[in-house]
Structure formats: C-alpha cells, structure tokens
Image (spheres, rainbow, N blue to C red):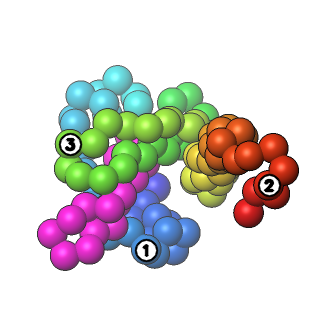
Amino acid sequence: MNAKEFREALTKIMPGYDWTVHKTPKSFASIGLGYLEATGIQSSGFNRLSTLSVARREKDGVVTFEAKSAGYGTRAKWLHVYTDTTLARALRGLQDYYEYMANTYGGHARALQNARKATGEVAA
C-alpha cells in the first residue's frame, strides 16, 4: 500500500476528517518495515475539535493498524490507542472503547445526580 492508497482508504472510511499522510523515514524501509502514518483533524473555524492518528505497519507480511485520538486543541493528549489487523477494526475498536467509557462514566454521573434528589422524588 502506498501513501495515495492509504489516504483513499482513510477518506473512504472516515470522510469527516481532513487527512494528511506523513512521509515515511527511509530508515524504516532499510530494516524491512513498511510504515505509513496519517493524521486526520476535525475543526470548526480555528478550533480543533478532534485529532485522529492512524499508523499502518507491515513487518514479515503481517499488517497492523494503530488508531489513536485526542480531544480539543492542537496540544491535547492522546486519549486512547487501539491496534488491530484491519483499518476498519482498529477504528471500530477505538470507537467501542469510547462508547464503553461514556456508558461507564454516564452511569456514575447519573448515580451521583440521583443521590442528590430527595428520597421521595423521581429522577428525570
């Protein structure tokens, strides 16, 4: 897979991001490691809303994709990393993790909110 094909695959599966494919260091090719990396951003005006980084590694015929994302701003920390054997599975795994965490934290937030209510009140 070359950089053009990588960009096309990323744009097809995640069209909501503006993708930049980065140059591969020559040292990676010299040791037999196929490597491509791309960064996708979502922004509103001058505000960066989301950053998604995807790396494709190929060694000894085995291809892996690593997807990681960060939140608001250009200096936001990476929130989570997920690696799988296909691009779609790596991105889905990352999304599933965030949905799981949202459900977990949402449940805790609702429990705290309900605990503040008087005993006879029903939570909304």
- State the CA–CA distance, disc 3 to disc 2: 44 Å
Q: Which residue is mark 2?
A: 121
Q: Which residue is mark 1?
A: 16
Q: Are marks 3 and 2 in contact (CB under 8 Å)?
A: no
Q: Amino acid at mark 1?
A: Gly
Q: Main secondary structure of the magenta part?
A: strand
Q: Give me the residue at 71% from left, 39% from top.
A: 115
Tell whether label 1 touches label 3 (CB within 8 Å): no
Three-letter code for the amino acid on which mark 3 is drawn: Arg
State the image quarter where residue 41 is shown.
bottom left
Asked whether residue 7 is in view, the answer is: yes
Mark drawn on residue 119:
none
Q: Secondary structure at mark 2?
A: loop
Q: Closer to the observer: label 2 or label 1?
A: 2
What is the three-letter code of the residue carrying label 2? Glu
Magenta span: 34-56
Q: Which residue is mark 3?
A: 75
